[in-house]
Image (tube, rainbow, N blue to C red):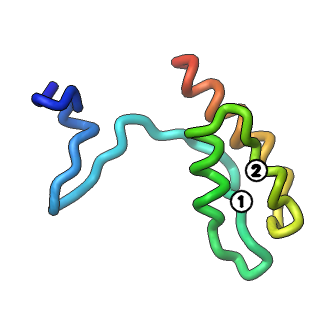
Amino acid sequence: PSADGATESQACNTQACVPAHLLQVAALPRTHNSKVMRNVMAQLFVNESGDGTEVVSEIANPSCLLELRAAVDDGAEGG
C-alpha cells in the first residue's frame, strides 16, 4: 500500500487507471439512444439503498438492473 492506503492496483496516475475489482455482467443500463448510464451504475456502488429505479423510464433495458445489483452485492461480499 502507498502512503494514502491505496494498493498498486487501485492507484491512478496520468498513464492509466486500473480498477481493483471487475464484475462481469451480461448488460449495462443504457438509454434509449444506447448510451451507457454511468450515473446509475455509480449509484449501485456508492449507495446501497439506491437501485437505479428512480430513472427506470429512461433505461432502455431495465431488466439488467437486477443482475447488476446482484453482481455488486456479490462483489461487496467477496463472492
SS type, badge 2 = loop
Q: Any mark on residue 64, and which?
A: none
Residue of label 1: 29
For the residues labelled 1 and 2, the Cα–Cα distance comes to 9 Å
Mark 2 and mark 1 in contact (Cβ < 8 Å)? yes
Residue at the far left: name it. Answer: 3
5 left or right of 35?
left
Q: Quadrant of the C terminus?
A: top right
Q: Identify which residue is drawn at 35% across, 36% down.
A: 20
Residue type at mark 2: give it.
Gly
Residue 34 in the image: above or below residue 23 = below
Residue type at mark 1: give it.
Pro
Q: Quadrant of the N terminus?
A: top left
Residue closest to the eye, 9 or 26: 9
Measured as percent of width and height from the top left, residue 69 is found at 71, 37
Residue of label 2: 52
31 left or right of 57?
left
Q: Identify which residue is drawn at 18% across, 35% down.
A: 8
